[in-house]
Amino acid sequence: MATGIPKKDKALSNGRVYLTYRGKATEEETPNTTVASFDKLHSDPSAKRLYFGDNLDVLRVLAVDSGVCGKIDLIYIDPPFATQSQFVSRKQSQAYDDTLSGAAFVEFLRKRLVLLHKLLSSKGSIYLHLDEKMVFEMKLIMDEIFGSENYRNIIVRKKCNPKNYTRKTYGNIADFILFYTKTDKYIWNKQTVPLSEEGKKEYQYIEEGTGRRFMKVPLHAPGTRNGETGKPWRGKMPPPGKHWQYTPRVLDEMDAKGEIFWSANGNPRRKVYLDEHPGVGIQDIWLEFRDAHNQNIKITGYPTEKNPELLRRIIAASSNPGR
């Protein structure tokens, strides 16, 4: 797989791309405080709140609440998906109508995103959960509101088991989560999974005396350097066009600790131990969080309930304990 070298040319950049459509309000028209009635069902001194009502009305009030506005570190929203359908619960009671589509849907959601942007703290993140019907339009809207420079990922989630489609198309088993931040200084707790058995096979060497498994990796990195890392170490220069990853002093310390493997021809390599592996970083395709109604687990009966483990991952990655 080819890897590109980042190169920004301002002369070739024509600025941001905007989505235009009939009925699009200006940003100044959105955060007004004219609201309808809604109920505050719960509130306590720890800032836990539960509201019942149109979320646009609630958001407009929160946007002028100094105790909340600009202090939210994490937002996850799972709005309607523009399915033009009516959803009922397992007991056949009405859950909600998802009848908006096209420009009406985009503007419905955009107004709320403008207010959510105001509510986020400078270290805050937002995750917008959608499917293929409107995710591309809303990507442009998110770029407009949050800035394309604050786009982090479009996460692909496997939502259900494979489908036996009768129509001429590929099975639709994925939806998407747009991940943006307020700034480039946001909360991020790296999430990992254990190394696979296949990955463990790369640690094929056994250290004498300790029995620890390790792999050998180069001690040099691409690029020439004029400082300490470009000088000889133990009489050896780094290969042409490269430099040592560490200064000679650090390399001496590593060697004294037995962390360097010397080949028969005197070529040094760094030992990377299996028992120190931090885990593999989570990627942007999530296969393990299928919706509850597609698994044999206890659910509430709400028709579009999301897997709680999905939310646990997002909360763990983009917020800190106690907040």
Image (cartoon, rainbow, N blue to C red):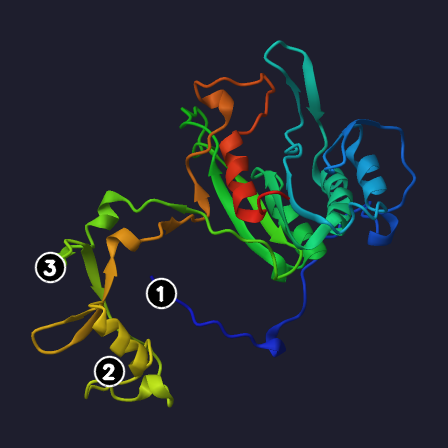
Note whether residue 93 is visible: yes
Counting from the top left corner in percent of width and height, residue 134 is at 63, 41
Please identify, in this view, whether the residue under mark 3 or under mark 2 is nearer the observer.
3
Determine the residue positioned at 53% across, 18% down: 299
- For the N terminus, the image quarter is bottom left
Task: Identify the amino acid type marked 3.
Answer: Glu
Number of the label disc, if any, that sits on residue 239:
2
Please state if 74 lies on the left or on the right of 269 as rendered: right
Determine the residue positioned at 66% across, 33% down: 82
Q: Secondary structure at mark 3?
A: loop
User: Eyeballing the image, is 311 above or below 69?
Assistant: above
Number of the label disc, if any, that sits on residue 260:
none
Q: Residues within 10 Å of mark 3 (few under 14, many from 20)?
A: few
Task: Identify the amino acid type marked 2.
Answer: Pro
Please state if 76 lies on the left or on the right of 168 as rendered: right
Please identify, in this view, whether the residue under mark 1 or under mark 3 is nearer the observer.
3
- For the C terminus, the image quarter is top right
* Residue under pointer 1: 2
